[in-house]
Each structure stands twice: as structure tokens, then as C-alpha cells.
Image: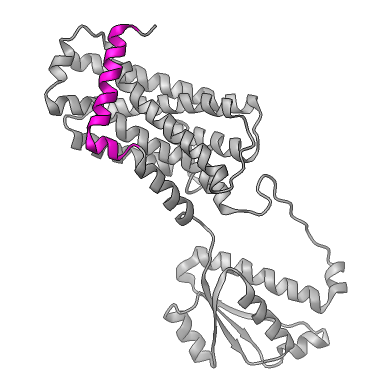
Amino acid sequence: MIGPRLLAIIRKEILAVLRDPRARLILIAPPLIQLFLFGFASTMEVNNIRVGILDLDGGRWSREIVERLAGSPNVREVLPLHSDAALREAIDRQKVIVALRFDPNFSADVASGRGAVVGAVFDGRRSNAAQIVSSYINQITMNVGAMTSPRAFAMTGGTVATHWFNPNLEYMWFVMPALIAVIGAVSALAVVSQSVARERELGTFDQLMVSPLRTHEILIGKMLPPMLVGGLNATLFVVLLPTVFGVPLTGSLLLFYVALFFYLLALTGIGMLISIVSMTQQQAFLGMFSVTVPLVILSGYASPIDNMPGWLQVIAWANPAAWFLTISEATFLKAMPAGQVLNLTWPLAVIAMVTLVAASALFRMRME
């Protein structure tokens, strides 16, 4: 199936990638750097927060809440405030994201069973962070309320939450498997988008057209090295995630690599379309960047696809990263059954077929 001509073009493309300093630079090092940077930086958790406290009570129960806040791993500093004006200034100047106010009779009201209210002022300019911090404050005050009146708390009932697949809600467990799809898309597109454009810029495209190679042999030869690079990076990530970052690998690696093959094939088809249209490597780079950004945004990495408008969800169906991201997360965290993995893999095969047929037709037109 792989004749001497096909082997020659594959060898030529691999050597072209390895001999190009810019191509070598983007093979391994940037994906590794991106894995560590995105893994630790792209988090929706709110940590290292500053909380302002205006305690006009100074009693037992206000101190209990303040001490629990100070002991929270999410709180960096508890800033004492001495007046309502100081509270207002702390919020206005963004010294704190939330300021709590305890009335003079707070502890007395709690002790008498009348109930007490904690005043809280949040910085609405950071709305998302403020909502998350509000849940932290509510959890702490509810726990203190259970201490003050355990019988009343028990009579109201409660909910016990069990988190499947990620019991401790480790945010890195959510992020890292998704990064395989995101970073894999960037690295694969970066390599394949330069292939035909590089031939044009170096003046060797005409030599390629008069060579005895058939069109499908040229395309296969140019697509195989990027797929090898993408597979190598994905394998490196599969090794690093359980060993370095502690993300469990519970699913089938065989099914994962089957899906990875079609995912890389779909990305290669998109990259070939960019490279065939581009006349220079700079144009190819700009084209790759213009495709990569919406590809990542519509993958479900930053926000769930279900939260997007209906017309964007339709576009996301044609995004290979959206399908493979689900497969990657499920392979690591929930051991998705083979049937479900295959149901998510066949759309990748369809996208790959469409993009590769389009790239082949466009390449034939350019050769003619």
C-alpha cells in the first residue's frame, strides 16, 4: 500500500519539518509549555481573595465566622474595617472583593435564637468572581448556623451531594484532559498549514507538480508528518497527566487512539485547506490563527456548548475539537463505554472525509 514514491514524499516532508528551525520549535516545546501554563492558569476557581470585616459586635459568633474565613484556603487576607465609610472605600478601590458587616447585637441575637443577619457587600465589577465568593460565604455561615442550632438545622432537612468522576472537584481534572484536544489542534494545524505554502514560498511547488507523484500521494505525504507530530504530543500528554498532574486514566486507550486518529485526520484536512489557499507561510500562519481561535471557543473548553445560542451550536457540530474534547474528558474521568465513544467518533470521521475531499479537489484545481 505504501510504494517507493509515497515513501519518498513522506521522508521528504518529515525532513522538511525537522530541518526547518521554526518547525522544530513548534513541535514539542510549545505544547509542553502550553500544557503547564493552561493547566495552572485557566481555572474558574476564585483563590487568594481579600475579605473586609466590619465587626461592630465582637462577640463569639461573629469571631467564629471571621476565624473560619481566615482559615479558608481560598482567602488570602482578612482586612479589618472600622467604619461604614472604610467599608465603602475598600469596595470602591477594589481592596476587597467582599466586605461583611456584623451589627452590634449579632452574637446576642444568635444566642437568643432570634436569628441574625450578616450584611455582605460584593464588588459587582467582578460579577463572576463575586458570585463564586458569595457561595463560599453562604457555606461558612450555614455551617456556623448549624452549630448554633443543630436541632433546628436537622429539622429543616438537607442535601448530601456526591460528585461522580471527580469527588473532590479538582479543577485540574476538568482542565487537563480538555487541553489534549485544544493544544493538539493548535500544534497539528500549525504544522500542516505550512506544508504547501512552504513549497510555494521556496519555489519548489512547480517541481512538485512535474514530479511523477500522483495527487493523492502528494497529499498523503504532506498529511502524515503532522499526524505523527499530533500523535506524539497526545501520547506525551497521556503519560504526563496521570504521572505528573494526578489525573486518573480510567477509560480505554485503544478507543482513545482510534478517536485521536480521526480527530487528527479532520484537523489535517482543515490545515491542508488553509495551506493550499495560502501563497506564503505568513498567510498560512494568519489563516491557521483565524481558524484556531473559533475552533477553541466553540469546542466547549471555555464554556459549555449547551449555553451557546442555537445557531452557534449548529456550527459547533462541525468543529472536530468539540467531539474529541468530550471523548478525552470521558476517557480520563468516567471510563465511557465503547458504544458511546464510537457514537462520538463517527462525526469526526465524517468531518475528516469532507475536509480531505475538499482539500484534494482544491489541490487538483491549483495543480491544473
Q: Which residues are magenta?
A: 3-27
Residue 13 inside the magenta-drawn segment: yes
The x and y percentages for residue 224 are 35, 21
Image quadrant where residue 367 sits: top left
The x and y percentages for residue 163 are 70, 50
Secondary structure mostly seen in the magenta stretch: helix
Residue at 60%, 53% in the rendered image: 170
- 138 displayed left or right of 219: right
Q: Is residue 324 above or below residue 50?
A: above
- 63 displayed left or right of 294: right
Toward the viewer: 266 or 35? 35
Residue 324 inside the magenta-drawn segment: no
The x and y percentages for residue 315 are 43, 35
Toward the viewer: 354 or 187? 187
Q: Is residue 285 visible?
A: yes
Residue at 68%, 79% in the rendered image: 65
Image quarter where the N terminus lies is top left
Image quadrant where residue 192 sits: top left
Q: Is residue 286 above or below residue 110?
A: above
